[in-house]
Amino acid sequence: MYMLLVKQFIRSKAVVLSFILIVVMGIISILIGRQFLSRQENTIRQVTTHQREHIERNVAAHDEMGLLLYYLRFSLISKPDKLAALSIGQRDVNPGIQSVTIRTLEGQKYDTDLNNPSNLQSGNLDLGFIILYLFPLLIIAFTFNLLSEEKEAGTWRLIAVQARSAKVYLLQKVSVRAVALYSWLVILLLIAILVLSLPVNEALWAFIVASILYLAFWFAFCFWIITFRRSSSFNVLTLLSAWVVFTILLPASVNNIVANLYPVPESLATMVKQRDGYHEKWDMDKGITMEKFYAHYPQYKSYGIPEQTFNWLWYYAMQQMGDDESVQYSNAMREKILQRERVSRSIAMVMPTMHTQLLFNDVARTSLTDYVQLLDSTHVFHERLRLHFYPKIFDNAAVKDENWKSFIPEYISDRKDMNWSAMLLPLIVAVVLLSILSVANMRQIKSV
């Protein structure tokens, strides 16, 4: 009986066409991911070359340390994980490279590349998209009429008589489709591993297990719906409506609700305070500026208050005030962004589609949390540069005495934490709960 079900399923032209479509689109998504990685790696190479040439050119053109450091930029890089090709996430919006001078940081750290807004709106076709949005549609298409077609064709009574158990027969039909779709998923993952040279590590296994559980959720959900023994039209409309709600409506609603619950007016306030904190110091007494600067850096207090009309000590003290006077708003904005992320993740615990999307981004290191980590690392990086160069600027050290070749782009370290229970438990709970509900409904399935 089981082999007959297999033959009946694979002989369907719809199944063959679906297989060709999902594999072709999956390969395209993998190639798009490879192109994305290639573009990121090329950008990193260009930044490395540019920083070296940029420093050499400016060192040759300036012999005053203060003026030279006005122009010099130093890069901090968050190198993308290869798994980012499968789930691009925030990487197409937020940059993975920060190039900053030692001047006011708040005016630099949110600089990003120019992108076509139409492309950003449509997003990237990565393998994560195929798994999250297209595989559920195939599951719906293959399962919505498992029971109803037999009843509508009048063959259910005959099947119930011939089969040892009508319920086992129904489970066998589901298993045939599950084996097929999981086989297609495995094929795409193997292609991705080979094409992208993905390392078989904990992150990749987390991506694979999450994909398996996500498809299991949709199989369990579809099976639960068909066990209500309604018509095929009712099943397909219900399942497609659920797909729209789970994949589009609920995530968009959550995003809108969170944005309204936690508005970020501090973004404008940070920019205004940063600019005012620097520009208004031109018209203020130098002593006021230097007093605030020495309160921040007491180790430089011995330099006193410059008497010249213009002095690099005073100039960089003004720049420092731009950051100091906007830090309250900057920290508040960071906290609001993280609060949005925390609330979204909490809500996603009961929304498998949204949870899986966030999970994919987490294991691929392309989440908003990873971008905030880059910003935090930029603060540390920028402060280290200031502490290194401030004494040299204030002492008017010779430019040629600095080892400029040692200043190459730096990389931030990857996050190593991976909480398996937090990642997978919501999906497991959803699958188990739907399975229990389906078993309860199956008790009512009879031979008529």
Image (spheres, rainbow, N blue to C red):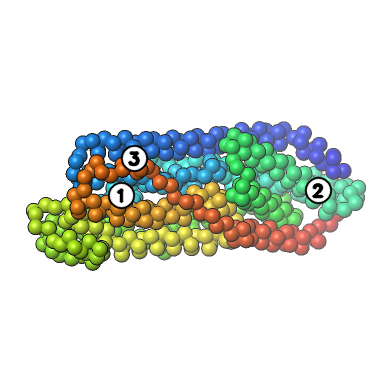
Nearest to viewer (mark 1 / mark 3): 3
Secondary structure of the residue carrying numbered label 1: loop
Tell me the tag on residue 198: none
Q: Amino acid at mark 2?
A: Gln
Q: Is residue 91 above or below residue 439?
A: above
Residue situated furthest front in the rendering: 401
Tell me the tag on residue 108: 1
The C terminus: image quadrant: bottom right
Assess disc 3: are there few (<14), some (14-19) or many (≥20) residues with their C-alpha within 10 Å of its C-alpha.
few
| Residues under numbered marks 3 and 2 in contact, where contact means CB atoms less than 8 Å apart | no
Name the residue tied to disc 2: 172
Of residues 358 and 143, which is closer to you in this image? 358
Q: Which tag, 1 or 2, sits closer to the chain's start?
A: 1
Q: Amino acid at mark 1?
A: Gln
Q: Amino acid at mark 3?
A: Lys
The residue positioned 40% from the left and 54% from the top of the image is 377
Judge left or right: residue 269 versus residue 315.
right
Secondary structure of the residue carrying numbered label 2: helix
| Residues under numbered marks 1 and 3 in contact, where contact means CB atoms less than 8 Å apart | no
| Residue 309, x across and y down, in percent | 8, 53
Name the residue tied to disc 3: 405
Q: Is residue 225 visible?
A: no
Nearest to viewer (mark 1 / mark 2): 1
Assess disc 2: are there few (<14), some (14-19) or many (≥20) residues with their C-alpha within 10 Å of its C-alpha.
some
